[in-house]
Amino acid sequence: MAPNDKAGELKPAFPSGASAQATALWYVSPRECALNAEALPAPSMGDCLVRTLWSGVSRGTERLVCEGRVPEGEHERMRAPFQQGDFPFPVKYGYCAVGVVEAGPADRLGQTVFCLHPHQDRFVAPADRLTPVPPQVPARRAILAANMETALNAHWDAGSGPADRIVVVGGGVLGLLVAWLAARLPGAEVTLVDVEPARAQLARHLGFGFALPVDAPTDADLVFHASASAGGLATAIAAAGFEARIVELSWYGEGTVAAPLGGAFHAKRLQLVSTQVGGIAPSRRPRWDYARRSAAAMALLADDRLDALISEDIPFRETPTRLPSVLDTSWHGLTAAICY
């Protein structure tokens, strides 16, 4: 092995001069995006140059960013890793990038990796911030890793268990992944509740039940709410059984939501708790770190049925014109994959 092939040493393949340029997507004003050229940072020892293959659009969070609705008091907590710019605009945002390592430590060369990085065709990141994508997970599907990690953390916060009667309100990507994980629990009775009847077929495909809000189950042992709506939260509370836990996954941005805490809420001694992927659930925190959780979420994506959660592919060069419509509430897909 040549001296510059040692693990941890940089390969002399990092671009320089005019070739050390990348193109990134920026949110520049309400509902307006642009592709901007920028210089790649000078690499440090242990850094990797990644050529992006796919990146995923996190519709709930990126809609708030695109519309400039990140609350002022949350500007720092809402910053994504490798974000540039400040809220509300202009800002380079995103956290679902999958690519191939083209330069860096020899043991990472050619590896397909996931990184919490904004939408950009090439980027430099420390090797320890990259999660390897196993061979059984296609690069396109690997963009779901951040959502899967959120769903996994939510189950840890919820304390889900075998044979539980579980209701998930809200059939977006996150709600579907929460329900998919729940359906893998032995004996669990899982129902997705959504206002869109077409979600019924997808629920069957993923292995759990479906109901419209008017037909939502009651007396559930555990309820997850992921619709980001007042109506969905009311449905979640109504579905909970005595002393059941309702886990709130929705992020409302600057908005407020009416919570129906009258009626039977107190008599049923219900628990309404939050979950957020930025912190590892207390039940796992003594033994798990972010790298272990990220690797576990990635491994869970080895199921071909999950490809159904990606509704549309968008060429990177077309994102300024097509992404605002994908982030609009009128779009009926689940998530979009940006291809490079």
Image (spheres, helix red, strand yellow):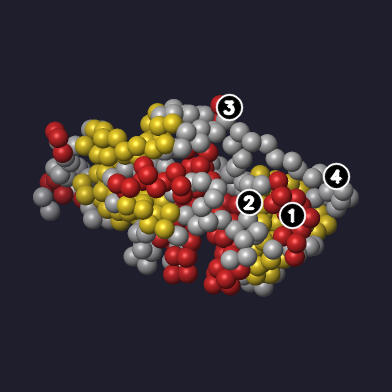
Is residue 209 shown left or right of residue 18?
A: right
For disc 1, the neighbor class at 10 Å (few under 14, some 14 to 19, many from 20) is many
Q: Amino acid at mark 3?
A: Gly
What distance separates the C-alpha of mark 3 from that of mark 4?
29 Å
Dot 2: element: loop
Earlier in the chain: of badge 1 and badge 4, it is 1
Q: Amino acid at mark 1?
A: Thr
Nearer the camera: disc 2 or disc 3: 2
Q: Amino acid at mark 2?
A: Ser
Residue identified by numbered label 2: 227
| Of the pair 74 and 333, the residue shown nearer to us | 333
For disc 3, the neighbor class at 10 Å (few under 14, some 14 to 19, many from 20) is few
Residue identified by numbered label 3: 73
| x then y, percent, for residue 26 | 37, 36
Q: Amino acid at mark 4?
A: Gly
Is residue 11 shown left or right of residue 280?
A: left
The answer to whether marks 3 and 1 mark residues whose Cβ atoms lie closer than 8 Å is no
Dot 1: element: helix
What distance separates the C-alpha of mark 2 from that of mark 1?
10 Å
Earlier in the chain: of badge 3 and badge 1, it is 3
| Of the pair 318 and 192, the residue shown nearer to us | 318
Q: Is residue 11 above or below residue 222?
A: above
| x then y, percent, for residue 57 | 44, 49
The answer to whether marks 2 and 1 mark residues whose Cβ atoms lie closer than 8 Å is yes
Residue identified by numbered label 4: 262
